[in-house]
Image (tube, helix red, strand yellow):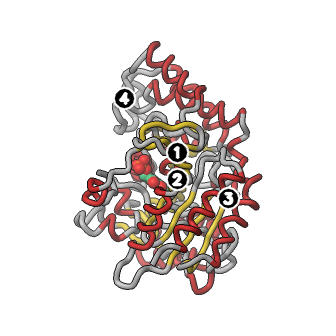
Amino acid sequence: MPFTANRQFKQAPRMLVSASGMYYRTDDGRRVLDGTAGLWCVNAGHCRPEIVKAIQAQAAEMDYAPAFQMGHPGAFDFASQLTALLPAGLDHVFFTNSGSESVDTALKVALAYHRARGEGQRTRFIGRERGYHGVGFGGISVGGIVTNRKAFGAMLPGVDHLPHTHDRSRQAFSIGQPEWGAHLADELERIVALHDASTIAAVIVEPVACSTGVLVPPKGYLERLRAICDKHGLLLIFDEVITGFGRLGTPFATDYFGVVPDIITAAKGLTNATVPMGAVFFQKKIYDAFMTGAEHMIELFHGYTYSGHPLAAAAGLATLKLYKDEGLLTRAADLNAYWAAAVHSLKDARHVVDIRNLGLIGAIELDPLPGQPTKRAFSTFLKCFEKGVLIRTTGDIIALSPPLIVETAQIDQIVETIREALTGLD
Ligand SMILES: Cc1ncc(COP(=O)(O)O)c(C=O)c1O
């Protein structure tokens, strides 16, 4: 099973059999409130009829069209609507099937872009400690989560890492973006000086590092990264697999922070998680760099059998319409003050050592059980599930990201359930 304690699970399986709106139902008939939007992906809530119908209709109309040398209107329509949502300039899309594939696509295109411009020596990538960019070899190489790397060999050569941005001694219980830490972006100057800018293709970061336990960027940090990348001709890639599609109260994190990267990776909320799909957004200059040579020749030797799959495109179009009709891409902004107060109200709960929040994301960090890292958080997860609330944990951190349709009473229920669970735990 993926990222699962297999033996523990098989002794007492946690099986979900149906879902609707904010709730799952288990095989023993219990209703479970979804505090995590599945895996940060069901932004509009579960089994929304508008999306279900669109998938059904597309399956009956045309199940599949070859992705190579052929096209279908759904993929182009979806691409146009997506780029209309993005900052000017990010006007080309490449479809994938997951966040991991989006990251590998972004990295490959970054290399090929420099080569197409006659700078093929730019082969290095700079990631960040505690970054999560999926599980492909590219993603784990630029990622910075030790457990996701240590068992899998030497990975991509020529990768360096920025330090992560979290320091509890200076940032604990920050509401929103921490004041301290913008200077950590200057580490990029040091890394550039070490390798020389002419060898570096791109810098990749999550605007908010979510899977590693919600590390909110310090005020001014992303702006500095952008400026340093500009100074040295490095592409800046924002991995928005989680922050895309309204999680911060804006369509994308690029809008929230006012920092525009050269490439954005997305997945998760793209189809409300109904059909697997990812997307990578590129600045026009990147697309244009490939459009040379004989016109009958393929310009980019990259793609997936299921790139722009008709069912995924149909699901994506219906999802985007729903997001717009219900104002979900900005709803997290309306809820933010309530959410922040609710999550931070756990400051005095048992075992809590830090709380972080941004948009509709929250993290509650626990003091680990001595000698048994992750156990206390995992026990909290099990207790909350017993009590009818799905939360997610990573290390000793509880990470929350409810669907963007969440109501305030449900926010209260999530927070109170965590408090009760913690109270009863060693
Ligand atoms: C920032 C980020 N990038 C990439 C991924 C990988 O996405 P997937 O699991 O769809 O491959 C994730 C998944 O959580 C993610 O959070």
Q: Quick check: marks 2 and 1 in contact, CB under 8 Å? A: yes
196 relative to 245 in the view: left or right: left
Is disc 4 placed on a helix, strand or loop?
Answer: loop
Mark 1: amino acid: Arg
Which one is in front in this view, the residue at disc 3 or the one at disc 2?
2
Give me the residue at 59% from left, 43% from top. Answer: 22
Look at mark 3 in the image and give the residue it sits on.
412
Under tag 3, what secondary structure?
A: helix
Q: Position of residue 238 (x, y in %)?
A: 54, 56
The residue that appears at 30% across and 61% down in the rendered structure is 156
Residue tagged by mark 4? 297
Name the quarter where the C terminus is drawn. Answer: bottom left
Q: Nearer the viewer, residue 414 or 41?
A: 414
Of the numbered discs 1 and 3, the one sitting upstream in the chain is 1
Which residue sits furthest top?
Answer: 61
The kind of residue tagged 3 is Asp
Q: Nearer the viewer, residue 25 or 280?
A: 25
Give me the disc on residue 31. 1
Q: Depth-wise, is mark 4 or mark 2 nearer the camera?
A: 2
Mark closer to the chain start, 4 or 2: 4
Looking at numbered disc 4 in the image, what kind of residue is underneath it?
Answer: Met
Q: Residues within 10 Å of mark 3 (few under 14, many from 20)?
A: some
Disc nearer the start of the sequence (3/4): 4
Query: Is 337 above or below relative to 164?
Result: above
